[in-house]
Image (cartoon, helix red, strand yellow):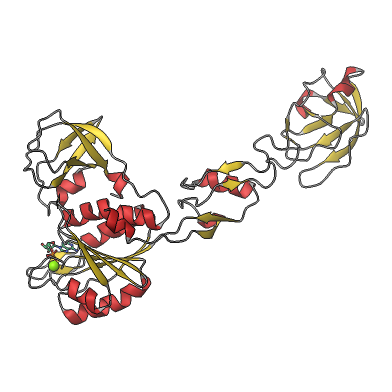
C-alpha cells in the first residue's frame, strides 16, 4: 500500500462558499479576525443602565433608545436607555434590566432592586477573542460549523479537495438494472456501489455508461473519461481471461500501468495506473472483491488525495464464531459487528452480494494464521470507516 500511496498525488485545497461547504473537510485552522460577539449587546428587551447609578435611587429617567442594527449615543449619567434584544449597549452602560421587571411611566422607570452588574448583556469577545482558533483543520463541516464561520464574517472557507472519481463498469453481460433481460445478462451492480463509496469518502463522482468487452468501445470510453478524472475506477476485465481487455486499452490510452500483487482474499492483483491527469484503479469485477478492494485501497488513495490522513482506523473485536482459514494470504471476512463481537456471515463467496449487504464490518484474518476459534481477538474494519 505504501507504493500505491507514493504514486498518489495530493490535490491542493480549494476555497468554497460557506453555503456550499456542508460535509466538506476543513483544510486549515480558522482563526478569528475579530472578537465574537463583535460588540456588547442586550440579550433582552428592557433598559440599559449603569448598575451603580441605581444605588442612590431606583428611579431613573429614560433618555434615548438603542435598536438592533444602530449605534446608540452614550448613556447619559444617572439615566436609563430603552434597549432591544441584539442592540448595542450604549457606552457607559453595563447592565440591562428586563422590561417585565420594571414599571415605566411618564418617561421614568422604576426598578425593583439594584440589578446584578452585567445582567442580560453579552460581552464583546465572550465566545472567543480575536486571533484564536475557532475551528481546527480536519473537521467535517456541519451546519453549526457553517453558522460559526458566517458569524466570524467569513463568506468563503478553505476545504480539502474533493477528488473527481469516474467509475467505468465493463462487461458484455451487463445491462442497466430494471431494463429488459436478455439471455446471459445480469444487472450492472458494481457501479453504484463504487460510486457511492467514493462519494462517502468525500469524492465528487460520476458513473459513466458501461463499456462492452471490445477494444473500440473501451477506447472510446477511456478517451472520454480519462481527461475528466482525478481517479478513474474501472470495474472488471482485469484478470487474464481472453476477454479481459481493460489493461491493453489503458496502455493504448497512455496510462502507465503498475500492478501490485495483493496477497488478499477477496481481491486479485490490484491494477493501478498513472496518467497525466491522475490515477487509474482497476478493480476486479466480482462485486465483493470490487467493494472490498476499493474499501481498503481506494479509501486511502482518496484520503491522501484530499490531503487527509491516509491510514486505516480499525477496531478490535472478538470472533462470535470460528473462521476457517488457510495460511498464506490475508482474508477479509464479512461479519456483523455488534457490541464488540464480530459474527462472520455464512456465505463468504466473492460474488455473494447478500452477505455484503447484511454485513457491517470486515474481519481481518492475518496472512500467517490458520483456523481461528470463536472468541479470538481480531482487527475489524467497520464499513463506515472504509466508505461502505
Ligand atoms: P471480471 O472481473 O470482468 O472477470 O468479472 C468477474 C465477475 O464479476 C463476473 O461474474 C462478472 O459478471 C461480474 N461482474 C463484473 N462487473 C460487474 C458489475 N459491474 N456488476 C455486477 N457484476 C459484475
Ligand atoms: Mg468481465
Closer to the camera in the image, 117 or 274: 274
* 363 over 229 or under it: above or below: above
- Whole-percent x, y for residue 149 in the image: 59, 48
In the depicted structure, whether residue 151 falls above or below residue 119: below
Query: How many numbered marks appear?
Result: 0
Nearer to us in this view, 64 or 17? 17
- Residue 145 lies left or right of residue 385; in this view the side is right
**Image quadrant assignment for residue 343:** top left
The residue drawn where x is 9% and y is 37% is 323
Residue visible at 70% across and 45% down? 34
Residue 223, placed above or below residue 71: below
Residue lying furthest bottom in this view?
A: 216
Q: Is residue 197 visible?
A: no
In the image, is residue 354 above or below residue 239? above
| Drawn side of residue 136 relative to residue 107, left or right | left
The residue shown at (53%, 55%) is: 158
Q: Position of residue 44 (x, y in %)?
A: 73, 33
Rendered location of residue 208, percent (x, y): 29, 70
- Does residue 158 appear left or right of residue 281 in this picture? right
217 to the left or right of 135: left
Q: Is residue 117 visible?
A: yes
The quadrant of the rendered image in which ligand 2 is seen is bottom left
User: Where on the picture, by quarter, is residue 56?
Assistant: top right
Counting from the top left corner in percent of width and height, residue 201 is at 35, 53
Amino acid at each position: 500500500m505504501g507504493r500505491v500511496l507514493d504514486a498518489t498525488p495530493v490535490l491542493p485545497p480549494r476555497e468554497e462558499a460557506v453555503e456550499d461547504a456542508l460535509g466538506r473537510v476543513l483544510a486549515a485552522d480558522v482563526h478569528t479576525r475579530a472578537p465574537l460577539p463583535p460588540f456588547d449587546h442586550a440579550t433582552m428587551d428592557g433598559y440599559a443602565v449603569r448598575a451603580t447609578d441605581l444605588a442612590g435611587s431606583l428611579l431613573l429617567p429614560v433618555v434615548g433608545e438603542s435598536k438592533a442594527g444602530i449605534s446608540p449615543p452614550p448613556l447619559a449619567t444617572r439615566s436609563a436607555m430603552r434597549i432591544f434584544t441584539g442592540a448595542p449597549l450604549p457606552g457607559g452602560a453595563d447592565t440591562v434590566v428586563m422590561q417585565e421587571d420594571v414599571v415605566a411611566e411618564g418617561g421614568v422607570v422604576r426598578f425593583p432592586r439594584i440589578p446584578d452588574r452585567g445582567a442580560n448583556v453579552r460581552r464583546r469577545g465572550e465566545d472567543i477573542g480575536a486571533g484564536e482558533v475557532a475551528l481546527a483543520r480536519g473537521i467535517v463541516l456541519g451546519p453549526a460549523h457553517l453558522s460559526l464561520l458566517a458569524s466570524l464574517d467569513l463568506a468563503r472557507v478553505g476545504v480539502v479537495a474533493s477528488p473527481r472519481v469516474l467509475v467505468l463498469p465493463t462487461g458484455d453481460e451487463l445491462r442497466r438494472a430494471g431494463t429488459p433481460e436478455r439471455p446471459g445478462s445480469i444487472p450492472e451492480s458494481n457501479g453504484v456501489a463504487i460510486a457511492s463509496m467514493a462519494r462517502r469518502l468525500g469524492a465528487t463522482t460520476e458513473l459513466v455508461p458501461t463499456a462492452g468487452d471490445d477494444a473500440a468501445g473501451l477506447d472510446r470510453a477511456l478517451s472520454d473519461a480519462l481527461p475528466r478524472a482525478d481517479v478513474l475506477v474501472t470495474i472488471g476485465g482485469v484478470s487474464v481471461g481472453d476477454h479481459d481487455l481493460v489493461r491493453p486499452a489503458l496502455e493504448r490510452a497512455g496510462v502507465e500501468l503498475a500492478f501490485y500483487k495483493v496477497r488478499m482474499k477477496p481481491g486479485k492483483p490490484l491494477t493501478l495506473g498513472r496518467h497525466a491527469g491522475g490515477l487509474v484503479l482497476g478493480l476486479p469485477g466480482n462485486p465483493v472483491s470490487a467493494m472490498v478492494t476499493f474499501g481498503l485501497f481506494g479509501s486511502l488513495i482518496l484520503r491522501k488525495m484530499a490531503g487527509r490522513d491516509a491510514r486505516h482506523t480499525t477496531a478490535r473485536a472478538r470472533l462470535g464464531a470460528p473462521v476457517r482459514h488457510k495460511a498464506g494470504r490475508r482474508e477479509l471476512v464479512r461479519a456483523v459487528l455488534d457490541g464488540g463481537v464480530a459474527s462472520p456471515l455464512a456465505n463468504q463467496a466473492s460474488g455473494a452480494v447478500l452477505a455484503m449487504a447484511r454485513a457491517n464490518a470486515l474481519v481481518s484474518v492475518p496472512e500467517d494464521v490458520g483456523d481461528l476459534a470463536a472468541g479470538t481477538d481480531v482487527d475489524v474494519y467497520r464499513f463506515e470507516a472504509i466508505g461502505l
